[in-house]
C-alpha cells in the first residue's frame, strides 16, 4: 500500500512467495544445513580445517560456518519502552495509536511458525508493519527447531523486521501440550537447539519472552537466563508470573530483579501490571538492573500511558479526547482491513475486543487516590459527562453502541463476546 510518502504498510506477502510456500518450493537449504551441522557438532560453533569440510546438500560446512559468523545488527535496548505482543488486540491499527502516544518498540501478535511456512494469509497478516513502527519485531511460536529456524530464515530474507521474539510464555493448553510456548520451558535440550539455531540463522537480534516458569513454586527463568545469552539471544523479557497463575496474582517484581541479575550482562525487560508512570518508576527503582519495561494490558486500558511515562505525568484525559482516539482507530482500521462491508465488520470486531479493555480506564478526576492500579476494580461510578459514563460501562451492549457511533449500525443478529478473559478483573 502506498501514499505520497511511499509504502506505509510493509511486509506484505507477495504472490510469488505465497506460491513457493504453498508448493513447498522455497529454498530452505541454509536452515536445514545449519541444523544438521549443529546436530553433528553439539558444541555449536566449531572450527573445521579444510580436510574436514563436508558437503551438506549444496551448502558446505564452510558455508554453514560463514552463516554462523555473519555480522549481526545490534539494537541498543537501554531505556526503551516496549508494547507487549498482544494476540487479537495488538493489531497494526492499535500499534499505530501506541506509536503516536510514544512507545519505542512494537511487536506483532504471536505468529505460529507452522502456519507461516504453509503460507496462511491470516498468519502472514501478523507480520505486517506500519512505517511508523521504527523498531519492530515479529513474535514466533513453535515446538521444534526445524520450523523455527526455517521461519527465521524466511522472515530474515524476505521481510523488513528489526528483531525476532521467541514466545516461551504462551499458556494456551493446545500449544503447551504440544510443547510450544510455555511448554518449551520444560524441554531444555529442545529449547537450547531452538535458540541456538534460530539465533545463528538470523542477522537480526533474537529476543526471548518468558514467564517465571510453568508452576508458581517452580521458577526456572533465573536458571535459564544465563544460558539464553550463551545460546545467542540478545534480550530477555520476563513476565513476572507463571503459566499456572495466569492473571490471578500480581507480577513478582522481586523475581524479575533476580532474573535480571542472573542474566547480566544480557539486557532484560520487566513485564507485568504497569498502568501508570508511578508503576513504571517503582518498577525501575526496585530493579535498576533492568534495561527497559514492557507494557501489555496497561496499553490496552490507556494507550496514552506511553505519553504519561515519557512526560512523567498523570494525564486527566477527557472523554472527548478518548473518543478522538477511537475515531483515529476507526480510520486506521478501515485503511488496514478495508472500507467495504467486510472491512467495516473487521474493524468493528477488533474495536469491540479493544473496548473490552478500554472500559476499565477510570478517569483521574473520578479516582479518590490516583493513579489507578491494574488489579483494582472500581465501584461503579458516573462519569463527568454522558460519554465518560458510557465509556465506563462493562456491558458489551454499550461497547456495541460506541462502535455504532463510529461505524454505523451493526448488522441484524449481531453478537459479541470478548475473546480474552484477561480483560476482566477476576
Ligand atoms: C489480550 C492479550 C493477548 C496477549 N497475547 C500475547 C502474545 O501474543 N504473545 C505474548 O508473548 N504474550 C501475550 N500476552 C501477554 C502479554 O504480552 C504480557 O506478557 C502480559 O499481559 C503481562 O503484562 P501486563 O501485565 O502489562 O499486561 C497477551 C496478553 C493479553 C492481555
Image (cartoon, rainbow, N blue to C red):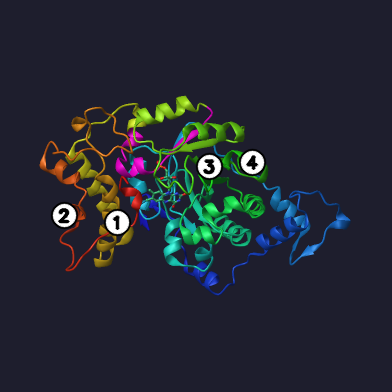
Structural crowding at the residue carrying mark 4, measured as other residues with C-alpha within 10 Å and reported as few (<14), some (14–19) or many (≥20): many
Marks 2 & 1, CB-CB < 8 Å contact: no
Read off the residue under disc 2.
401
Which sits earlier in the primary sequence, circle 2 or circle 1?
Answer: 2
Q: Secondary structure at mark 3?
A: loop
Magenta stretch? 289-307
Residue at 73% x, 61% y: name it: 36
Is 261 covered by the magenta stretch?
no
State how far apart marks 4 and 2 are (Cα): 49 Å
Is 303 covered by the magenta stretch?
yes
Structural crowding at the residue carrying mark 1, measured as other residues with C-alpha within 10 Å and reported as few (<14), some (14–19) or many (≥20): some
Eye-nearest disc, 3 or 4: 3
**Beta carbon of the mark 1 residue lies under 8 A of ligand 1:** no
Which sits earlier in the primary sequence, circle 4 or circle 2?
Answer: 4
State how far apart marks 3 and 4 are (Cα): 25 Å
Is 375 situated left or right of 174 in this image? left
**Farthest residue toward the top?**
285
State how far apart marks 4 and 1 are (Cα): 38 Å
**Beta carbon of the mark 4 residue lies under 8 A of ligand 1:** no
Read off the residue under disc 1.
418
State how far apart marks 1 and 3 are (Cα): 31 Å
Evaluate whether residue 160 shows in this view.
Answer: no
Q: Looking at the image, is 267 positioned above or below residue 331? A: above
From the viewer's side, name the closer residue of 294 and 210.
Answer: 210
Read off the residue under disc 4.
229
Read off the residue under disc 3.
217
Amino acid at each position: 500500500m502506498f501514499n505520497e510518502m511511499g509504502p506505509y504498510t510493509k511486509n506484505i506477502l507477495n504472490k510469488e512467495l505465497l506460491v513457493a510456500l504453498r508448493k513447498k518450493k522455497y529454498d530452505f537449504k541454509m536452515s536445514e544445513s545449519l541444523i544438521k551441522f549443529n546436530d553433528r557438532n553439539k558444541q555449536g560453533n566449531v572450527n573445521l580445517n579444510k580436510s574436514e569440510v563436508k558437503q551438506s546438500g549444496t551448502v558446505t560446512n564452510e558455508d554453514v560456518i560463514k552463516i554462523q559468523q555473519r555480522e549481526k545488527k545490534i539494537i541498543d535496548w537501554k531505556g526503551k519502552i516496549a508494547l507487549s505482543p498482544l494476540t487479537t488486540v495488538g493489531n497494526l491499527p492499535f500499534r499505530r495509536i501506541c506509536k503516536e502516544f510514544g512507545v519505542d518498540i512494537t511487536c506483532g501478535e504471536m505468529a505460529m511458525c507452522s502456519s507461516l511456512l504453509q503460507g496462511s494469509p491470516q498468519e502472514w497478516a501478523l507480520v505486517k508493519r506500519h512505517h511508523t513502527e521504527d523498531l519492530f519485531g515479529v513474535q514466533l511460536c513453535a515446538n521444534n527447531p526445524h520450523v523455527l529456524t526455517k521461519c527465521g530464515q524466511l522472515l530474515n530474507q524476505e521481510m523488513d523486521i528489526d528483531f525476532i521474539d521467541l514466545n516461551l510464555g504462551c499458556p494456551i493448553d493446545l500449544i503447551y501440550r504440544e510443547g510450544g510456548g510455555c511448554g518449551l520451558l520444560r524441554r531444555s535440550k529442545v529449547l537450547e537447539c531452538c535458540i541456538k539455531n534460530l539465533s545463528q540463522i538470523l542477522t537480526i537480534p533474537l529476543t526471548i519472552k518468558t514467564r517465571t516458569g510453568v508452576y508458581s513454586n517452580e521458577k526456572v527463568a533465573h536458571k535459564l537466563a544465563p544460558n539464553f545469552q550463551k545460546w545467542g539471544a540478545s534480550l530477555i523479557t520476563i513476565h513476572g508470573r507463571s503459566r499456572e497463575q495466569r492473571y490471578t496474582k500480581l507480577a513478582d517484581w522481586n523475581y524479575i530483579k533476580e532474573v535480571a541479575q542472573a542474566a547480566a550482562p544480557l539486557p532484560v525487560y520487566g513485564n507485568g501490571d504497569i498502568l501508570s508512570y508511578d508503576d513504571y518508576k517503582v518498577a525501575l527503582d526496585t530493579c535498576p538492573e533492568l534495561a527497559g519495561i514492557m507494557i501489555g494490558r496497561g496499553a490496552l486500558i490507556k494507550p496514552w500511558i506511553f505519553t504519561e511515562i515519557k512526560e512523567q505525568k498523570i494525564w486527566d484525559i477527557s472523554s472527548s479526547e478518548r473518543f478522538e482516539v477511537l475515531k483515529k482507530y476507526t480510520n486506521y482500521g478501515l485503511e488496514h482491513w478495508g472500507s467495504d462491508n467486510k472491512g467495516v465488520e473487521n474493524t468493528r470486531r477488533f474495536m469491540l475486543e479493544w473496548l473490552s479493555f478500554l472500559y476499565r480506564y477510570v478517569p483521574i478526576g473520578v479516582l479518590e487516590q490516583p493513579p489507578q492500579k491494574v488489579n483494582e476494580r472500581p465501584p461503579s461510578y458516573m462519569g463527568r459527562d454522558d460519554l465518560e459514563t458510557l465509556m465506563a460501562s462493562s456491558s458489551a451492549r454499550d461497547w456495541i453502541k460506541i462502535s455504532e457511533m463510529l461505524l454505523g449500525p451493526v448488522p441484524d443478529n449481531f453478537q459479541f463476546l470478548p475473546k480474552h478473559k484477561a480483560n476482566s478483573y477476576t
